Amino acid sequence: VRREALKILRQRGSLLDWQFDRLESEVNAPWEGGLSAAIGQLTDLKTELEERLAGLSAEDKKRIVKPEEARDLKTFTVEQQEVVLEVAQHLGDNSVRTIAMGATDG
């Protein structure tokens, strides 16, 4: 039953990966109230999120992305980039202030 419930949660995308991993570890833990503790934490998290949403203005609520739309968003990848720095000042304690000789893009 536990494995089937976890499988359904994973398929539906009901939880974020870290939430699912935590729930899975709690479910597979020795029976010391692990599942009830995990459910309690998720309930607390849901309550906190609902309180935060209630505090948002109407303008902010317009900016919230629905889960269906979030799936269609394009993501970016992090690529390694070589950055050349010029030492502008020696600060002491093995620290320096530098200037990038090229674009750092954020």
Image (tube, rainbow, N blue to C red):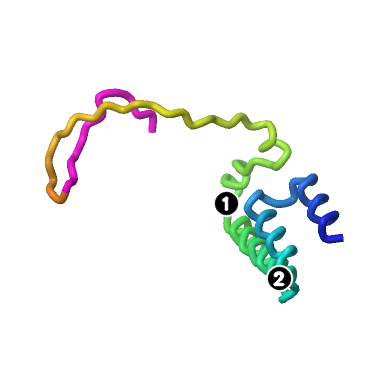
Residue, disc 1? 57
Name the residue: 69% across, 54% down: 20
Q: Nearer the viewer, mark 2 or mark 1?
A: 2
> Which image quadrant: the C terminus?
top left
Query: Residue 53 location in percent, x, y?
Result: 62, 55
The outermost residue toward the right is 1
Front-lying residue, 78 or 62: 78
Would residue 103 be found to the left or right of residue 38 on screen?
left
Q: How many labels sit on residues? A: 2
| Sequence order check, earlier mark of 2 and 1 | 2
- Determine the residue located farthest toward the front in the rendered image: 30
Label 2–label 1 contact, CB within 8 A: no
Q: Residue at x 17, y 47 (%)?
A: 94
- The magenta segment: 94-106
Label 1 amino acid? Answer: Ser
Q: Is residue 13 above or below residue 99?
A: below
**Residue 5 percent location from the top left of the image:** 83, 56
Helix, strand or loop status at disc 1: loop
- Taking the magenta stretch, the answer to whether it contains residue 6 is no
In the rendered image, which residue does mark 2 sit on? 34
Hey, which quadrant is residue 85 in on the image? Answer: top left
Quarter of the image for residue 100 reads: top left
